[in-house]
Amino acid sequence: MKYFLLFALLLIVLSREQIEEVDGVLQLNRKNFQQALDENPRLLVKFYIDTCGYCKKMKPVFIQLAGMLKEYGFVLGELNVHENKAFSAKNNIKSYPTLKLYKNGVPKDFPNSSDSVELLFEFALQNAYDQITQLNTQEEIDLFLKRSNFAILKYVNNDDDLQKFVDENLGIKFGIVVNPELQQAHSSKYTLYHKVLPEPLNYNGEIDGFLEWILTNGYPEVFTFTEEEFIKAERDKISLVGVAGVKNSQLYETLQGLAELYKNKIRFILIDPNSKLPNKRFHYLIKKKVVAKNVVYYYNYETNKTNTVEFADESLETYKQLVQTLIEESNIKKETNKSGSINYFQGDGEVHVLTTSNFKEQVYNNPNHVFVKFYAPWCGHCKKLAPIYEELAQQLDRKDIVIAEVDFTTDKIEGINIEGYPTLIFFKSEGGQKIKIEFDGMRTIEGMKSFLLKSLDNDSKSEPQNQLTEENLDVKESDRVDIPNDGQVIQLTTDNFEQIVLKSNQDVFVKFYAPWCGHCKAMAAEYIKLAEEYKDSKNVLIAELDATVHKIPIVEIKGFPTLIHFKKGNVRVKQLKYSGKRTAQAIKDYIEENGSFAKKQDL
């Protein structure tokens, strides 16, 4: 028996051959993928294809990232999708490259910005570790502090619950030192480490006052906009003054002096022009494409507006005057907008910047028409189009047509699927809705200008609207057809609604949603699960329709999501509105009880 177990163990060892490594990156395939997951608790995988130009551009970045992350316990691997098609499809790989971080075997989507190894590196460190880590050796403590911008170590054994601090979502990492010798060698209960602060800070007070102490003492006077500082700024909603510059300069000293003068009233930020992530975070707020030198940016959290002023002198007195001027200008704008009206973008000669946070307000809710360029910073065609697009904004001379753009590599928009860059979509305002019209003409000023004007002057150019009436709900059984059910949520449009919903043999349960709707997003996973429950069903189809784009006259929509069960009678299709719990099981129970196929028991 002993020899048999040894032999079995030997077979297991032999079956797990060492995975090939090229330039520090594991070469993965469907056969060794599980082995890589089992052996590496922090595995970052790039799924790629040979013909993808973006994948080729990312290759040296990925190799560099592998070297940077090695000492932090990461292993990087890559898998050729063309050579492992079925395996890649099973893992829901639809675009290239796709990066996934596997933390103890559990996948997490990962940004694939090939031009920023800095972004990839920080994202990996922020997301591959738990917020609370137990530390047993000095080596573990050193590595914990090295990978954390902002960290707190606990050196005492007590009942203090750190989870409530994690729940505050401050981005702070907590380490619990469990080694008795290391605990005794430290005199304080807690020690706060911030890479920007000159030295660690000790805390020996009660847990009830700990959070306030962290928020008051744990941050520098002048922010450089690390992730943790950005979170703090978003939490406090104090107006920001930002300027491009570097530490150890006269400008930095000036900002420190101003921070003392305006303490708890204005937060000052120094943005290093060579650091991509702080620039991205500041850009997210001020909605300006470039943080220019010799320009002071004043961002008012109350109005979400940015005022700017140029400067030549970096003295404290000059800056005091500039800041006061910006505050006064901002207050004037706030007074003129006290009615509560939203400042919608309009055609004013500028290319307006859209983000995930303002897309709904500035595109779907904006009464003006909006022409949007979805681009990627690394895309050559996008770079070529940029000056032409800016010229279009200047020449168009129509206040009711907004020219805008969104970096789709950093700001994903719910309900918008982009297959190539640049993609240009015209969101035309019509009847209180937005009609999406994709531009596929020549990317010249005249080509785009002609497209926009014709789309407005000729209604036939816009997306056709569904012309269904109540009479269409009457469908003979002989006119109905079976539609295969592959367990996916069917995507409905104005074109296929009648054929799928009304003329199918099956009952159809439809979710009418809006891409920006929080309740719709919250039930998305359950709705996919519901569709999977009905795979191969001859009785039920699960479908959804973006009601902000496709209008169905026979359906009344008063809010999102609206859930309707289209139940097939002998002749007529009935609409039954569902108002129960939005879980897969609850909806399924409802369908099974109320469907046209349900067998009612005699009482």
Image: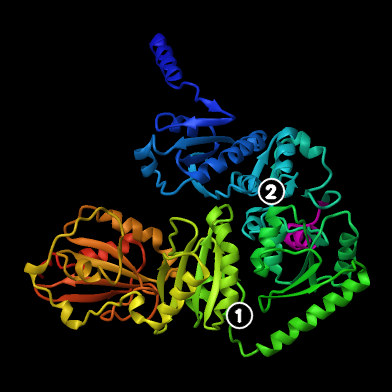
Q: Examine the rendered structure and indicate whether residue 134 appears above or below residue 32.
A: below
Query: Picture coordinates of residue 416 (x, y %)?
Result: 44, 63
**Residue nearer the viewer, 331 or 520:** 331
For label 1, the SS is: loop
Q: Which residue is drawn at 40% across and 71% down?
A: 437
Task: Tell me if mark 1 has few (under 14), some (14-19) or many (20+) residues whose alpha carbon lies within 10 angstroms of its own.
Answer: some
Relative side of 477 to 275, left or right: left
Mark 1 — residue?
348
Residue 183: which quarter of the image?
top right
Quadrant, the N terminus: top left
Choose the circle earlier in sequence order: 1 or 2.
2
Q: Which residue is drawn at 79% across and 83% down?
A: 328
Query: Picture coordinates of residue 130 (x, y %)?
Result: 60, 46
Mark 2 — residue?
174
The magenta span reads: 202-218
- Kind of residue at disc 2: Phe
Task: Tell me if mark 2 has few (under 14), some (14-19) or many (20+) residues whose alpha carbon lies within 10 angstroms of its own.
Answer: many
Q: Examine the rendered structure and indicate whether residue 187 appears above or below residue 350.
A: above
For label 2, the SS is: strand
**Residue nearer the viewer, 227 or 312:** 312
**Residue nearer the viewer, 168 or 601:** 168
Query: Picture coordinates of residue 356 (x, y %)?
Result: 55, 65
Relative side of 346 to 596, left or right: right
Query: Picture coordinates of residue 395 (x, y %)?
Result: 58, 77
Q: Does the magenta stretch include residue 207?
A: yes
- Kind of residue at disc 1: Asp
Q: Does the magenta stretch include residue 349?
A: no
Q: Residue at x 35, y 76 (%)?
A: 461
Farthest top residue? Answer: 3
Q: Which residue is drawn at 45% across and 22% down?
A: 16
| Type of secondary structure dominating the magenta stretch | helix
Quadrant, the C terminus: bottom left
